[in-house]
Image (tube, grey):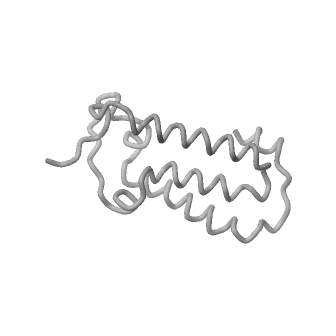
Amino acid sequence: MGIAAALVSTLTWPPLLYFWPLIAFGQFLNFRVYQLLGESGTYYGVRFGKNIPWVTEFPFGYIRDPQYVGSILSLLACLWCVPFRYILLWTLGYVVMIQVESKEDPTTRAKPPS
């Protein structure tokens, strides 16, 4: 992924002003999801029989699909150096995954507290 991005990028310094808040908040969301869910929760551990606790702390309950949102924000931050078509295709991939996962069998997801 890094090599592919380097092949199509045109790095200039300093990045445009929108870069810093988008990358910071996007990566914060990704970090927070990983912090709350751990490795098993972040990487679909529930589908491999792992018990993943239901989480209601920020960003869960405030932002739908916070890890995808964080990734999309981080991608948008890279518009200053990566051509739009690549960012668009990658973002569309995340949007498709959000749709696919929203239609999955509920038994393959973490269980809310009773």
Asked whether residue 20 appears in the rendered view, the answer is yes
In the rendered image, residue 63, in percent from the top left (x then y), is placed at 42, 58
Q: With 11 as the anchor, is 42 left or right in this view?
A: left
Q: Is residue 76 above or below residue 90?
A: below
Say how many tags the image has.
Answer: 0
- The extreme top residue here reads 48
- Displayed quadrant of residue 35: bottom left
In the rendered image, residue 4, in percent from the top left (x then y), is placed at 76, 38
Q: Is residue 89 above or below residue 58?
A: above
Q: With 73 as the anchor, is 44 left or right in this view?
A: left
- Displayed quadrant of residue 20: bottom right
Q: Nearer the viewer, residue 29 or 89?
A: 89
- The extreme bottom residue here reads 17
In the rendered image, residue 71, in percent from the top left (x then y), is placed at 57, 51
In the rendered image, residue 76, in percent from the top left (x then y), is placed at 66, 56
- Seen at 37% across and 42% down, the residue is 41
Q: Nearer the viewer, residue 14 or 114?
A: 114
